[in-house]
Amino acid sequence: MPALAEAGYHVVAPDQRGFGRTTGWDAAYDTDLGEFRTLTIVRDALALLAALGIRQVEAVIGHDAGARIAGTLALARPDVARRVAMMSAPFTGPRPLPFGTEGAPAPPAPDIHAALAALDPPRKHYQWYYATRPANDDLMRCRQGLHDFLRAYYHHKSADWPGNRPHPLRAWVAEELAKLPTYYVMPLEQDMAQTVAPHMPAPEAVAACRWLPDEELAVYAAEYGRTGFQGGLNWYRCNTSPAHTAELQLLAGRTIDVPAAFVSGAQDWGIHQVPGALETMRTRFCTRMTDCHLIEGAGHWVQQEQPAEVVRLLLDFLRREG
């Protein structure tokens, strides 16, 4: 944020609904999930801009789940976002409406969860685990404590973990998804804290971690200790439930037509966790994708692991004539 501001841009980065210091949401599991739907979060961003007296922005920028919010905003309101930059999670828009099914309904999709559970060893997908009732308590009451859980989780998904050597997967089938690290496709009988615990970095590695020193990680641990994880987990509950994603089909078939950029770590499995998504985003969904960068020496936390290079690429994208 300071680097972009020093370059002359006004940067606005709110805690989003369910996180940090933003209020007006319910932290309970048994709450109205409509509060956490994608279009609700997009509306939050538009309402914030309106409150600030801003009608149009040079770019909307989002990382991971924020990439979906940024992409949806650019898809729905290209009059507001002149550009869009998405990081670490390729975005291909809402699922298409079934087409040409009159008299011949589409066959039901295979049960990927049953297929994962039938593997040896049995597995489960992290997003559907995060949507379960026990997930918040699993994380808040984990044996290693909140700070150490977050340290292992951040390390496991970073370029510092030597197992992050991603490659494309052929299809959304259990045998291919099982090639993902366990922080994406977990052991069936473990929670996430148990899954990442064996990958806790050694004390000397923690001391050498300049992109997330312990005093900064302590801020994350304190905030999650105060709010819990349920607000963020409710995002997963919405996005894994057809009942809460159906409204997005109002935008089905549309493309992002403003200049678009994608930035990710070269050691980030997230670019391949949905097979084919990166290529679809680049070649079909974003009609003006001018930039697609995979930064060496960065895993999933690209803006933290390699901040100078991310800023350089963003400024180049922002300054280029549209």
Image (tube, rainbow, N blue to C red):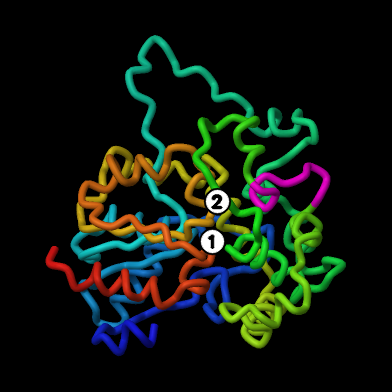
Instruction: Verify whether residue 185 appears in magenta.
Output: yes
Query: Residue visible at 24% across and 78% down?
Result: 54
Query: Which quarter of the image is occupied by the C terminus?
Result: bottom left
Question: Would residue 4 be found to the left or right of residue 162 on screen?
Answer: left
Q: Nearer the viewer, residue 292 or 79?
A: 292
Question: Would residue 301 be found to the left or right of residue 197 on screen?
Answer: left
The residue carrying mark 2 is 269
Q: Which residues are magenta?
A: 181-190
What element does badge 2 sit on?
A: helix
- Is 228 situated above or below 71? below
Q: Give yes or no for contact between labels 2 and 1 (Cβ–Cβ under 8 Å).
A: yes
Residue 275 in the image, given as x and y percentages of width and height: 48, 38
Q: Nearer the viewer, residue 209 or 157?
A: 209
Name the disc covering residue 127, or none. Answer: none
Residue 15 in the image, given as x and y percentages of width and height: 49, 76
Q: Nearer the viewer, residue 174 or 96?
A: 174
Residue 311 in the image, given as x and y percentages of width and height: 36, 75
Q: Nearer the viewer, residue 19 or 321?
A: 321
Say which amino acid is labelled 2: Trp
What element does badge 1 sit on?
A: loop
Secondary structure mainly formed by the magenta segment: loop
Query: Residue visible at 65% across and 30% down?
Result: 175
Query: Which quarter of the image is occupied by the N terminus?
Result: bottom left
Counting residues from the start of the chain, the first of labels 2 and 1 encountered is 2
The residue carrying mark 1 is 300
